[in-house]
Image: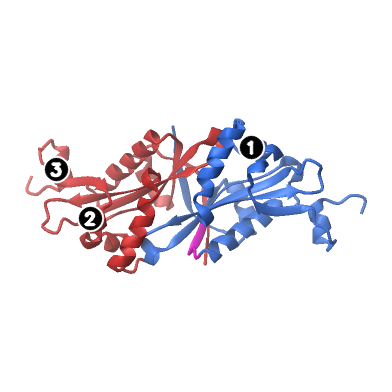
Chain colours: A red, B blue
Amino acid sequence: MATTSPESAAAAGETNDPIHIRRLELSDHERGFVALLSQLSTCPDLTASEFATRFAELAAQGDDHVILVAEDTSAPERRILATGCLFVERKFLRGGGKAGHVEDVVVDAAARGWGLGLRIVRRLVEIARDAGCYKVILDCTPELRAYYAKCGFVEKGVQMAVYF
Amino acid sequence: MATTSPESAAAAGETNDPIHIRRLELSDHERGFVALLSQLSTCPDLTASEFATRFAELAAQGDDHVILVAEDTSAPERRILATGCLFVERKFLRGGGKAGHVEDVVVDAAARGWGLGLRIVRRLVEIARDAGCYKVILDCTPELRAYYAKCGFVEKGVQMAVYF
């Protein structure tokens, strides 16, 4: 092959996968994490202080709130190329059960087709199962049904929203 | 009128609305709260201790987790006739925005048509707005689209799920 994406190199069994899937770190503010989110939704930049405050609030939730990122360790600036979030909702039903919610999955436009989003979502589903969730749910556009079906999701209902 | 529901009596301007919408209390375990949830999903009863543990976990989330109930103050046992939940998700996008999630809305079969579910959902939407959420979302079956439209919700996407 003339060129390979980092992902296809890893899929071909080459040894050094430069993509590292890990939990969000405070220093990811400098690795383009907020700019990546702006490819999903309105996302003005946050100051380092604002970022740190929100990071601490979420870290206080422990394993009930997990943000995974895909870091490109081959690039000098070690950019974040993809992310996805899982939070765990504790309920009274299902015997005091827990439901996992996947939110804010986005892959950098330059890295789409490498499978990074699927790797992150599959990992989030594993984390939810290991945490004892009885289900994981997410909302998406109709065009993404087939994408999430690759991670085992089936269509379940309709998402309704009120925007203020 | 020969008979009126508590709700229609209130709507007619009669003074003493026997339905009290308030936050979940620990003592609601004895007022049929878990049995009410069983009308929505699999919901084995919880012991008083199990209920108290989950109640405390959720109470620790403060105003980020609100369960409203509709109590029938005219009945000797002061049964819970309806409930709905709101939790607030803190995000990095939208300038460190917050999204409200409405979950586990259910009305007792004997009290449907009184408008209790709508009262609870509207109140949850108000709470989310007052908390600074930029949106409130929920998932439902397609048959309930018109019901939630009465609270200002519009269809936004598709809900996908994995069950373990």
| Residue with the mark numbered 3 | A17
Q: Nearer the viewer, residue B148 or B70?
A: B70
Counting residues from the N terminus, which is met first, the one under dot 3 or under dot 2? 3
Q: Position of residue B18 (x, y in %)?
A: 79, 53
Q: Position of residue B5 (x, y in %)?
A: 82, 50
Residue placed at 19% from the left, 46% from the top? A20
Tell me the amino acid under the disc marked 1. Val
| Residue with the mark numbered 2 | A80
- Is-magenta flag for residue B22? no
Q: Which range is magenta?
A: B132-136
| Residue with the mark numbered 1 | B34
SS for callout 2: strand
Alpha carbon of mark 3 to alpha carbon of mark 2: how far?
A: 15 Å
When asked about the image quadrant of residue B41, the answer is top right
Q: Do the dots labelled 3 and 1 sit on one chain? A: no
Is residue B18 shown left or right of residue B123? right
Q: Do the dots labelled 3 and 2 sit on one chain? A: yes
Question: Which residue in the rendered view is the most extreme toward the left?
Answer: A2
The disc at residue B62 is: none
- Is-magenta flag for residue B134? yes
Residue placed at 32% from the left, 63% from the top? A51
Q: Nearer the viewer, residue B163 or B65?
A: B65
